[in-house]
Image: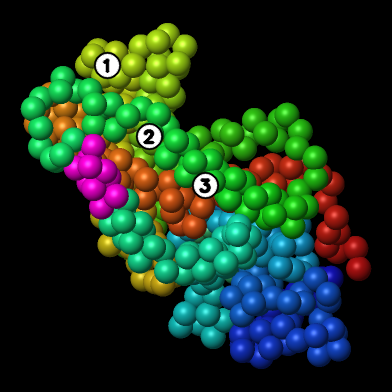
Amino acid sequence: MSLDKLMSEAKSLASGHITESAELVMGDGAACGGVSPALALLSADEAEAARILQICNACRYCEGFCAVFPAMTRRLEFGKADINYMANLCHNCGDCLHACQYAAPHEFNVNVPKVMAKVRVQTYTDYAWPPTLGALYKRNGLAVSLAMAAAIALFLILAVAMTGSLLHEPLAGDFYAIFPHNMLVLMFGAVFGFSVLALGIGVSGFWRQVSPGKASGPAVIETTKDVLRLRYLDGGHGKGCNNEDDAFTLWRRRFHHFTFYGFMLCFAATSVATLYHYLLGLPAPYAWTSLPVILGTLGGIGLLIGPAGLLWLNFTRHPEHGDDAQKPMDRGFIVLLFLISLTGLALLVLRDTRYMGLLLALHLGVVMALFLTMPYGKFAHGIYRSAALLKWAIEKRQPLKVKLGSD
Ligand code: SF4
Ligand code: SF4
């Protein structure tokens, strides 16, 4: 297909508008008429993404911004799997909206970050396991609030049941004098195990649908680097994302790094403490200078700075960058991470006082709320985006199937 033909198709798609487009692609085979089977069964948001990608594929101005555009140029049409893959490849940096000559008020009304955000949350819902719980993505702010309230109430009640009161004589930081170790392992192990299983089943369904091909060692290494560096939050030019306007900022990337590495350090602290307990026979509490406490403290500080910054960016974000309906999910997750860190650090500082039981119940409640909502909330974006990045690292090493100019 020539570029002229692509552009004229893009114009006709743009003038056809999404309602007509969505009806066309959502019909049965006969109703689809000349539409390829690859375009069948698209939702309205996916059809809008396909329309926009057709326009972008003729324009190609944003090719250097992120992996979405080079992935797009390897295709001439966009089926459900392609759109789901590219939606998760988009890091919502906003750069292609501010650069776009076809954004509103142009009649093409191109807005890549917004439509990708809408499709992205739909993919989490579509692949969720068990499927009925996928609906929680749509009401995630409420789900997080209810999970947090219920989990905190549960641990407060348990603390009173175990010790007779939320306040007590100082216990030298011995958490297990309030909640027995085996009880905590059983409760958190069961919920965490279910969450990992649910997320794993969900993302493996996504992986099968996007048919990535075999992952080579270099592809895995490149993906790992891209994930750890959050490469595509640099906007492709190193100056960063757009946030409230067309000025670039690297703070979105930095606050994501604080959050990600803060979380990983806290996870490492828990893992090291588990090894201490089971391998070395050294149960908590641990000294301030011990490895679990140092890792947990550094992680906790990162998990205060990162979410606080992300919340500030979220409130000042340009309204056209994303999907307003997802703001409760984004903010609920950010606040949850912040509260985990705040209660964890407060617990560490006050663990030798009579408030330890109360703070421990609050901390365990918010951690449990995170574990409960992990497969049905914002946490999923890191897993799906990593899978999409791996698909891109595999795909870019495969021969180009599209031969523009050959017709
Ligand atoms: S977002 Fe706009 S400028 Fe960028 S490739 Fe698409 S149509 Fe072109
Ligand atoms: S918003 Fe950013 S990451 Fe998403 S497609 Fe546009 S340039 Fe790429």
The amino acid on which the numbered mark 2 sits, given as a three-letter code, is: Leu
**First in sequence: mark 1 vs mark 3:** 3
**Residue 285 position (above or below residue 385):** above
Pointers 1 and 2 in contact (CB under 8 A)? no
**Which of the image's four quarters has the C terminus?**
bottom right
Q: Residue furthest top?
A: 280
Type of amino acid at the residue the image marks with label 3: Ser
Residue of label 3: 195
Image position, residue 308 (x, y; %):
25, 48
The residue positioned 40% from the left and 10% from the top of the image is 281
Question: Magenta stretch?
Answer: 153-162
Q: Nearer the viewer, residue 278 or 97?
A: 278
Locate residue 32: give its quadrant.
bottom right
Disc number placed over residue 257 in the picture, else none: none
In the figure, 163 relative to 331: above or below? above
Q: Residue 168 appears at what percent x and percent y?
A: 10, 32
Residue at which label 2 appears: 184
Identify the residue position indicated by label 1 in the image: 286
Tell me the SS state at disc 3: helix
